[in-house]
Amino acid sequence: MQPPAETRPRHALAHGVRDYLERERARMLSACTACGKCFEACPMPGYIANRGDETPAQVTANVLGLLRDGQASGIALDWIKACVRTGECVRACPENVNPKLMMRMAKMIATGGMGGEKLLPVKDDRDFFARIRAFAALQLTDEEFKAWME
Amino acid sequence: MDGMNAHDLPGRGERITLWYGCNVLRHGDIVHACLDVLRALGYDASPAGGPDFCCGSTKDANLVAADGMAQRTVDKLNRRGAAQVVSWCPSCHAQSLELHAKGYELQYGNRYFVELLHENRDALKKLFVHPVPMRVFLHRHMGFNDKVAVNAMVPEILSLIPGIEVIDDDLRAPGYMCAHLATVPSAMAHMVRETEARMQRHDADALVTLFHQCQRELCGLETEGGKPVYNYMQLVARAMGLAYEDEYKDWKRAGAGATALIGPQRLEKVGAALFERAIVPELVKKTTR
């Protein structure tokens, strides 16, 4: 017997973003050699205070540690926090790891987005979407608001 | 192209969804101009956006929520039935390519708005009937350009407007858009200082942004006494003779006094408490320098 339509999984929505990211996490941990090329190519370390004397390879290894165990040491957390998805790392990576996504996942983990301990603070902006609706109410006609936003 | 049937225009009446995003709703003039230009090119464009169509990229710190939003939005865009979804927002476009398409079955093709304009540039040129005499300095980022070559396409589009001269410069800001960059204040301040220095060196008349978040973050340079700051779509609109006002910039200039420009009727739709709590702080915020 078929379950009711509203509870049946829709074939078009079968896998999900979270499953994909978990698969990517495993792939990255297997593919990345922590060579540090991504860190070298990134424009953001120049804006990290107290960079210390860690090598790019050590910093990258610490990012992998976060992906593996949910823990980070050294300046890896500062680098993760400063990542703004520039993408220079993707071109620099010799192993097809996709370090931009790796850094994004590291930030997801560090902010508690994938479960585990929260290592980086998250801006708690509870008016984020209310603000957008407010601007929409100011900028769109009532008819546009109804037709375009729902 | 007055009097022409949509099927005689390059869009040929094709049904598309203009997925404009969330934060661009601060700039109603940009959303309206995007829709107008698509329709002038012959597309049957239907807009969709706002929180109910959020791509989920704002919820990286809560993947359960992010995935739920992604699923909901893909489902809604699928149900709209248009074969093409044209994104305005680079974050939404990237999220769709990088995550939505990996986790879900998208029953539509993804295009970025600039790609569509660039592809239709011959027809677009005919729409640019009003000169916009201006030497402009383009504000470009390093990110996103790997997905769509916006840093080359937008100057090509702007160069079709009579009177516009796009200054050649190699400054590229880190990241996708300035709202991301602003989370690293020292990087944002460095970029702003460098931009102002180069504009002065080139004797630029105006700064032109590619993305709405950059327009939001940088329009304060004008309202704080600097040179004009436009989004490229505002210049496209002007060249087409579309008379939209950049109200967000006016409100930013007025700061806490923006209520007088908005008027009681519109304020009532928002509510005084939300306006004071969520909008005024943004309007009075100064540009990071």
Image (spheres, coloured by chain):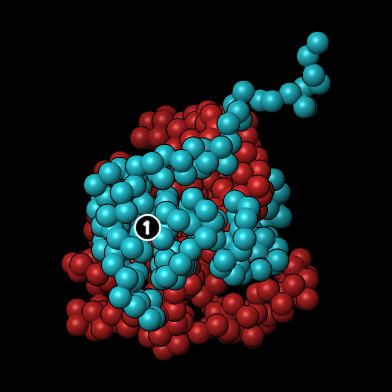
Chain colours: A cyan, B red
In percent of width and height, residue B113 lies at: 41, 47
Q: Residues within 10 Å of mark 1 (few under 14, many from 20)?
A: many
Tell me if I can see residue B245 in this picture. yes
Q: Is residue B200 above or below residue A4?
A: below
Please name the residue shown 38% across and 31% down the image: B8
Secondary structure state at the residue bearing disc 1: helix
The chain letter under disc 1 is A
In-image side of B179 versus A31 (left or right): right
In percent of width and height, residue A116 lies at: 62, 55
In-image side of A25 versus B114 (left or right): right
Q: Between residue A127 and residue B154, name the one nearer to us.
A: A127
The residue at which mark 1 appears reads as A61
Q: Between residue A133 and residue A129, name the one nearer to us.
A: A129
Q: Is residue B168 above or below residue B53?
A: below
Please name the residue shown 50% across and 84% down the image: B286
Q: Quadrant of the N terminus of chain B?
A: top left
Q: Which three-letter amino acid code belongs to the residue tagged 1? A: Ala
In percent of width and height, residue A89 lies at: 30, 55
